[in-house]
């Protein structure tokens, strides 16, 4: 082989390989950068117990952030997204070159022809495949966002339940105090003969005290169960050290107006965003189906190393997409999937609208109950207690009515706490729908989906 022929042969191979080099898809670099940035957050060692940095005074956002960084469901969704991002480059690349070989042999080797073969698709077809893979990575990203939001929502829900149980346990202790006071007054009245205390009343108070003690024990068991759930939602196993248990206050969260909530749901809801990404992927799939009518071709060359002078045999092939009915069916199926994906977005928006109305009703119903307790029931009980104490001082009635009235007031406070818990549970659902379950600027979310204040 002469130097010139050797150079020509290498030039053919190099030219073929350069043709196979495709530009990076527009969304590929951004997706890759996002995945790499967020991936560095997962590279930190897993922290448990005191090493987590969580204390009893840590905020809800601190616990949400820790759970999102620590929960395996989030890590699994991230790895699925990263795998989808890494699949973009192969989709826009050409198949691997093939090493071909041919030889003629009789008694001796007569011909020895190695060579290379390259298969090519058009740039338009590969661009369509890259756009489809990029859209698929966005679907995976939205699934990852949903995983972050779900974990944060579970943490928030158990946070509300822990706050309710702390309040309910405190009120049950107040109930026991009121019952002890009632029992003491009844015992004194029964012993002295003053008032209307009877043995039946003493038995009733004893039964109510036993029931309150049973309720307090059940609440303690429920608190232990909720703490176990809270620990699991933080991504901690039962064998891991317990985190610092928070003692959150049960307070009403502010909500934006209904039209603002609906705007945020349409703009940021993870489920809707994932469905819209699926629409984009199906649109790209239509382009891929339409490009199947473009021929593919193969080129290559073989060199006979036994020949003198050197013999180079060029090779080429061209696919013939002549079955137009098949191409039309593939395109029609892709368009149908696109239309179905778009219709699912509309159906999910209707479901969101119905769920928004339901959650807002639950919030308003709880608000009415809380307003009744705060504005009517508790002030009336306070006035009743003041009246009974004044009547007792004048000798007109028994002091036993005071603890009984206080007992009824505690019961109303328990109902208020339950209504506030129901309200915050509905608010949590609204927060998840509006994609605010994770704090804005979360280290695990890209800036493009972080909700705006």
Image: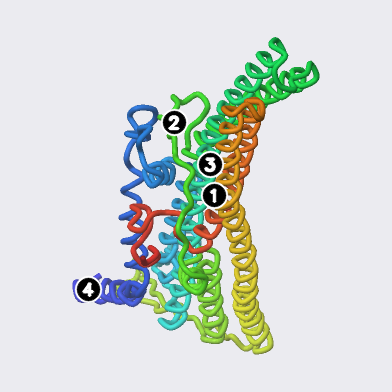
Q: Distance of mark 1 from mark 2, alpha carbons?
A: 30 Å
- Residue at 59% across, 85% down: 321
Q: Secondary structure at mark 4?
A: helix
| Residue underneath mark 2 | 245
Residue behind mark 3 = 158
For mark 1, does the 10 Å Cα neighbourhood hold few (<14), some (14 to 19), or many (20 or more) residues? some
Q: CA distance from mark 4 to mark 2?
A: 74 Å
Q: In x, y percent, where is residue 104?
A: 48, 65
> Among all residues in the image, which is located at the extreme right?
200
| Residue at figure coordinates x 33%, y 57% from the top left | 441
Give the mark, 1 or 3, whose residue is nearer the N terminus: 3
Residue 341 appears at what percent x and percent y?
Answer: 61, 75
Q: Nearer the viewer, mark 1 or mark 2?
A: 1
Return the residue nearer the eye: 350 or 411: 411
On residue 374, which mark appears?
1
Mark 3 to mark 2: distance in Å? 12 Å
Asked if residue 76 lies left or right of residue 452, the reply is right
Which quadrant: the N terminus?
bottom left
x, y percent for residue 427: 53, 56
Q: Which residue is mark 4?
A: 7
How far apart, in angstroms, are the residues tagged by discs 1 and 3?
A: 25 Å
Give me the C-alpha separation between circle 4 and circle 1. 92 Å
Packing grade of label 2 (10 A; few <14, some 14-19, many >=20) is some
349 or 375, which is in the foreground? 375
Q: Residue furthest front?
A: 394
Q: Residue at x 52, y 66 (%)?
A: 274
Identify the mark nearer the N-term, 3 or 4: 4
The earlier-in-sequence mark between 4 and 1 is 4
Q: Are marks 4 and 1 in contact (CB under 8 Å)?
A: no
Q: Is residue 154 above or below residue 27?
A: above
Mark 3 or mark 2, earlier in chain:
3
Whether residue 103 is visible to the viewer of this picture, yes or no, is no
């Amino acid at each position: 082989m002469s130097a010139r022929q050797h150079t020509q042969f290498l030039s053919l191979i190099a030219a073929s390989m350069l043709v196979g080099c495709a530009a990076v898809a527009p969304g590929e670099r951004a997706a890759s950068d996002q995945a790499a940035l967020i991936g560095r957050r997962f590279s930190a060692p897993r922290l448990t117990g005191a090493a987590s940095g969580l204390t009893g005074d840590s905020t809800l956002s601190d616990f949400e952030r820790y759970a999102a960084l620590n929960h395996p469901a989030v890590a699994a969704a991230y790895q699925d997204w990263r795998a989808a991002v890494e699949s973009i480059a192969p989709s826009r690349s050409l198949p691997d070159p093939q090493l071909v070989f041919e030889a003629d042999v009789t008694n001796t080797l007569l011909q020895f022809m190695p060579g290379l073969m390259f298969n090519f698709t058009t740039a338009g077809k590969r661009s369509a495949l890259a756009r489809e893979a990029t859209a698929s990575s966005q679907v995976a990203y939205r699934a990852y966002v949903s995983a972050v939001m779900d974990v944060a929502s579970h943490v928030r829900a158990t946070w509300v339940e822990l706050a309710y149980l702390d309040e309910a346990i405190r009120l049950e202790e107040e109930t026991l105090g009121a019952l002890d006071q009632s029992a003491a007054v009844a015992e004194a009245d029964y012993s002295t003969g003053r008032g209307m205390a009877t043995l039946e009343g003493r038995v009733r108070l004893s039964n109510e005290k036993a029931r309150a003690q049973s309720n307090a024990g059940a609440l303690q068991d429920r608190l232990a169960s909720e703490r176990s759930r809270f620990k699991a939602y933080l991504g901690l196993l039962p064998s891991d050290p317990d985190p610092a248990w928070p003692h959150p206050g049960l307070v009403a969260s502010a909500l934006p107006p209904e039209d603002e909530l609906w705007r945020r749901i349409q703009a940021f809801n993870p489920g809707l965003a994932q469905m819209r990404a699926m629409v984009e992927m199906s649109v790209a799939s239509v382009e891929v189906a339409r490009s199947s009518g473009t021929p593919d071709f193969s080129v290559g060359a073989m060199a006979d190393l036994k020949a003198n002078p050197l013999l180079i045999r060029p090779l080429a092939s061209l696919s013939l997409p002549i079955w137009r009915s098949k191409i039309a069916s593939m395109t029609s199926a892709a368009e149908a999937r696109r239309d179905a994906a778009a219709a699912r977005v509309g159906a999910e928006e209707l479901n969101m609208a119905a769920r928004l109305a339901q959650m807002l009703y639950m919030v308003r119903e709880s608000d009415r109950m809380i307003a009744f307790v705060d504005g009517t029931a508790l002030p009336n009980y306070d006035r009743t207690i003041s009246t009974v104490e004044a009547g007792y001082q004048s000798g007109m009635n028994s002091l036993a009515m005071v603890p009984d009235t206080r007992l009824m007031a505690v019961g109303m406070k328990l109902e208020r706490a339950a209504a506030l818990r129901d309200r915050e549970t509905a608010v949590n659902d609204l927060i998840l729908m509006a994609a605010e379950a994770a704090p804005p600027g979360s280290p695990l979310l890209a800036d493009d989906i972080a909700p705006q204040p």
